[in-house]
Amino acid sequence: MSPCADASQDPLHVSGHPFRIERSAAKQPAVEDRPDEQFRDNARERSCRMLSAVARATRSQSSSPFSRYARHVIADDETLIHVTPDAAWLPRHGRAEVIRRSTPPRPMCVVRLFLRQGDQVFCVPRDENSRLDLPMRHVGVDDPSGMLAIADLAERVTGRRSQLTFSGAVRNIVESPQDGYPWPTPCAYFGVWTSKATPVVEGTWVSIGDESPLRDRHWFPLAGHVRIR
C-alpha cells in the first residue's frame, strides 16, 4: 500500500474549532411540555461522541502515511491499474503506480492531454528528445492540482480550455530520494486528462494497440481505461 496521502481529499478531516453546544440563557420549558427533548439531547450527545472519536482517530493516525492513504483511497474510489516495483527511472527502491480516479491528487507535477481518435492518440515531439508523446506541460508550485496547467495546455493544443476530464495518473513513490531526483517525495503525480476537442496544432496520430510505439511510456497502462466524456 502506498504511503501517499492527499490531504485535500481527506474524508476524516476535522476542523480545529471545538464542537460545542450552546444553550439559550432563557428559561427552558419543563421536560413534560417537550416530550422530544430527551431524544434531541441524546442525539446531540451521540454527535459529540462521534466527532470526538473521529478527532482522536485522526490525531493518532496523522503520523501514519498508510492509514492516511487508506482514507484517501476511500474518498476518491481510486483504482490501482499497474505497478512497477524498483522502477529503473526512480531512485533505489522507488515504485511507480498507475492509478485511475476521478479527481486529480496532489502534488501534481506534470499534466498530459489525451486526445483519442479510434485506436489512435494525438502526439507531439517531446522537447528534450523529440520522441512522440502526449502533449504535456510542467505544473507550477502555485497549482498543486494541475488544473491551471491542463487548462493552459488544452487551450494551446485544442483552442479551448473546457470539456476536460481527469482520468488518472502515474504516481512516483520515492521514500529515499537521491541527489538529482527533481520531484517531490515521497509521492509525485503525473496526471492524464481527456477531451473531446480536436487539435489545432501540428502533431501525429499514433496507434495505442498491442504493438504501439508508445507502450513504454509510463502512462500507457491508462490507455485502455480512459473514458472520453
Image (cartoon, grey):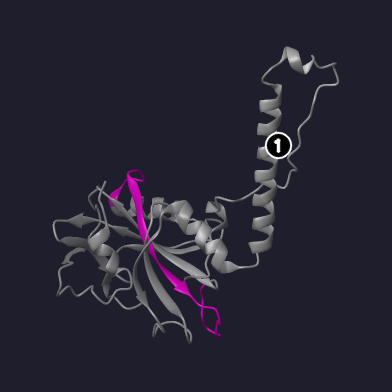
In the picture shown, does residue 49 fall above or below 217? above
Residue assigned mark 1 = 45
Report the amino acid beneath label 1.
Glu
In the picture shown, does residue 177 fall above or below 82? below
Across and down, in percent, residue 174 comes to 51, 78
Quick check: 213 left or right of 7?
left
Quick check: 143 left or right of 155?
right
Element class at badge 1: helix
Across and down, in percent, residue 90 comes to 44, 82
In this rendering, does residue 116 appear at all? yes
Across and down, in percent, residue 194 comes to 30, 53
Across and down, in percent, residue 141 comes to 55, 61
Residue at image point 19% right, 75% down = 213
In the picture shown, does residue 85 fall above or below 107? below
Q: Which residues make up the magenta segment?
A: 158-183
Going by the picture, which residue comes out furthest to the front?
A: 32
In this rendering, does residue 127 appear at all? no
Q: In front: 205, or 60?
A: 60
Residue 159 magenta-highlighted? yes
Quick check: 12 left or right of 91?
right
Residue at image point 13% right, 56% down = 118
Which quadrant of the view contains residue 86? Answer: bottom left
